[in-house]
Structure formats: C-alpha cells, structure tokens
Image (tube, rainbow, N blue to C red):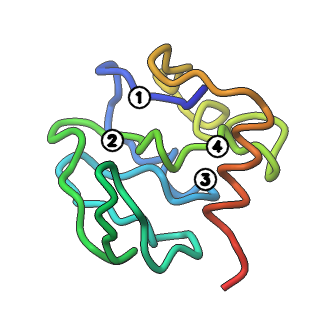
Amino acid sequence: MAIMITDECINCGACEPECPNTAIYEGGAEWTWGGGTALKEVEIDGGEIIPGDAAQPPISDEFYYIVSDKCTECMGFHEEPQCAAVCPVDCCVDDPDYRETEEELLAKKDWLHQAS
C-alpha cells in the first residue's frame, strides 16, 4: 500500500528529500510524473498520453502530500518507508485506499525507474 501524510503534518519538510521516487511534494506545489523518475511520458486513464514533465495539480494545498501512484513504500530502495522513518510527528502512515502487494510495489518501482 502507498503511504499518505495525515493532516497532523507540521510542514517541516523532513520527508520530501528522503523519497527515492520524488513522490512527496509541499502543499500547493504542482507535481510531475517524470520528476525523480525515468518516465518521459505516461498513459493516464482513458488512454491519453501526457509528457512526464507536464505539471499536475497539487493533491493538497495545506500539507505535504504523497502521490500514491509514485509511492513504492521505498520497496527496492530501503527496508522501510523513509518518510515514516524521519517524520517527527508520525503522520506518514499506510494509506488504506491504496493496497498493493510487494510484487506490485516492485513492479511500480521498475516502471518508474525504467532504463531510458
């Protein structure tokens, strides 16, 4: 499952540099598929293909947030999610809306960081 940041976030930013997938963004910041990954383009729902550097709308305007489709729980990089390991208020928690197996998380990691 992906990790999410709860509204208990104090916006300290400790989590953001720890993410190997660049899946964590400051509240209000736009995000991209390509940022921190090897993705040059992505096929989204409905078959539309968008450039990897196309800005996507923020998921939260108030707190740091995690793009679930880029989160691999640090699988293949670290033994535990690094955002949760460094969070001083324990607000990086499992997201019950995004349940994935270890195999799915590793496949996502491979997709995000495919050889270019």
Q: Are marks 2 and 1 in contact (CB under 8 Å)?
A: yes
Between marks 3 and 4, how big is the CA–CA gap? Answer: 13 Å
Between marks 2 and 4, how big is the CA–CA gap? Answer: 17 Å
Inspect the image, locate mark 4, and give the three-letter code of the amino acid beneath it: Thr
Q: Which mark is residue 64?
A: 2
- Ranked by sequence position, the earlier of labels 3 and 4 is 3
- Ranked by sequence position, the earlier of labels 2 and 4 is 2
Inspect the image, locate mark 2, and give the three-letter code of the amino acid beneath it: Tyr
* Residue 111 drawn above or below residue 115: above
- What secondary structure is found at the residue carrying circle 1? strand
- On the image, numbered disc 1 is attached to which residue? 5
At label 2, counting other C-alpha atoms closer than 10 Å, the crowd grade (few under 14, some 14-19, many 20 or more) is: many
In front: 3, or 45?
45
- On the image, numbered disc 3 is attached to which residue? 18
Between marks 2 and 3, how big is the CA–CA gap? Answer: 13 Å
In front: 32, or 17?
32
* Residue 79 drawn above or below residue 93: below
Q: Residue furthest top?
A: 96
